[in-house]
Image (tube, grey):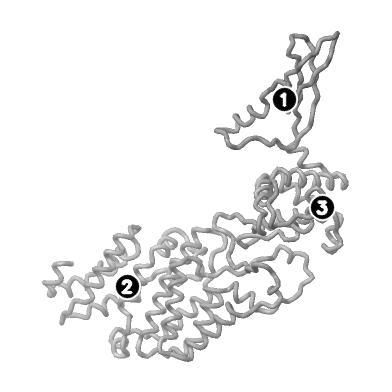
Amino acid sequence: MFDFLYKTLFLATFLVQPFFADFLLEILISTSSREVRQCALRNIIRLCKIETSACDIRAVVHQILLKARLPLWATSSAGSRGINQKLLSQSIEYFDLRCQLTENLTKQMQITLNINAKQILTDEFNWLSTYAVSTTSNELRTIDNILFIGHLRFIRTLLTCENINKIEFGIDFIRLLIDQFLFPASKSMSLPIVPSNNDNDSLDDSVPEPKCSTSESRLAAYDVLVELVRNCRINLKIVVDDLINLHHRPILEKQTEWEFMPQVNPRASCGLVGLYNGGATCYMNSILQQLYMLPQISEHILSVHDDLENNNETNKTGDSSLFYQLQQVFGHLMESKMQYYSPESLWKVFRLWGQEINIREQQDAFDFFTAMTDQIDEYLKSMKQEEIFRKQFEGIFCNQMICTNGCRHRYEGEERFMALNVAVKVDSLNESLNQFVKGEVLDGNNAVSLIIKNHKQFFFFVLIIIK
């Protein structure tokens, strides 16, 4: 590159070599090293700035980029395989070069370079309109966003060209970007609610995910909007009106709700769904999440056919309603497309020791677990179903009282349990269990004595976990 700056006579010869086009594309998009691609981008831009009477270097590079057979206009990354998928993920520098060469092109320069900016912009709009993002693979979703970054930057650059009428392209691009690429959730919420009698809609809580799901791709979309409204009042009014309608219009039916926060975020990339904290319901959420993560529990709960499931939800009372709401929670944790689920109906029907719960009042997680599992097992038993929590969690421990005076008196009693309340401020679970079963001498106020043949006997208490 350094030699070409001072020996421009050799440059024309170099550019017309058959290998040059392949070489340029190889270092610009095909190589897997981003550092090499970025270095190539910088040097190709420097190359295009060299003035020589032999040829127009900028035009030569432009034609190479235009004629290159690249899969960058595929309708979906899911249909790409192998090398094509690799090229999609490495396309940023290719589009950046096209942006550098196309920025603020005059009408005359477009003719010289044999470029029709208006037609290219139309083609870009058609591609954006029809591109289908991947919903099954995080890797493909990343590729989608990389591709969007390149195309959106290129679109912004094309809008700076001389013969582009922003008003002509404005409304179509603005509505496409706002409704599909940036704020589809807000758009969905702004539409009137259509009642449905379909029972399957109870789990259909999905809100469309924005096509631009990374900060970089969203920034590229914002830049296009900024360029569309620059020196164009008509487009500015469209953007402002749309944003006010989507984000600043009061939702009358939700005005009475405390801390109303509509869901707009999609399911996390890890594939898990969270539970909304109603104020102090973390104790409840932690237990529900743990139970759901046990397949033998969640799968059994979801597989039970409730005889009342065909009735209206409001007709269900007591444990039946609680069981139904637990199925709802597990169903949403399994199938919801949203970031979290708010178990408001479960809060309303659950009773802790017969009392309604205050979601802004902290309760003990152990108490909640005990009450929840007891009520669900009782309901399953009434339906002649297997008591799943008792089957999975029930254990037996034995209380032993051993005489401390050397006699052979021993008293034992078995007791069933569903959970053990052990200490947590210890080094390990084994230490917690050792403390739980640690024996103690029953004396003083805790003394248990038995007079045998005029002798008072004192006992040593031991707890043994049998099962």
The N terminus lies in quadrant: bottom left
- Whichever of callouts 3 and 1 sits on the residue coming sooner in the sequence is 3
Specify the label residue 409 is tagged with.
none
- Residue type at tag 2: Leu
In this rendered view, identify the residue nearer to me: 14 or 370: 370
Residue corresponding to mark 1: 463
Q: Position of residue 153 (x, y in %)?
A: 40, 75
- Whichever of callouts 3 and 2 sits on the residue coming sooner in the sequence is 2
Disc 1 to disc 2, C-alpha distance:
75 Å
Q: Nearer the viewer, mark 1 or mark 2?
A: 1
Q: Residue furthest front?
A: 444
- Whichever of callouts 1 and 2 sits on the residue coming sooner in the sequence is 2
Residue corresponding to mark 3: 305
Specify the label residue 97 is tagged with.
2
Q: Position of residue 435 (x, y in %)?
A: 64, 28
Residue drawn at 69 percent across, 36 percent down? 421
- Judge whether 238 appears above or below 152 on screen: below
- Judge whether 438 appears above or below 58 on screen: above
| Label 1 SS | strand
Q: Residues within 10 Å of mark 3 (few under 14, many from 20)?
A: few
- Judge whether 137 appears above or below 460 on screen: below
- Judge whether 75 appears above or below 318 on screen: below
Which image quadrant is residue 341 in? Answer: bottom right
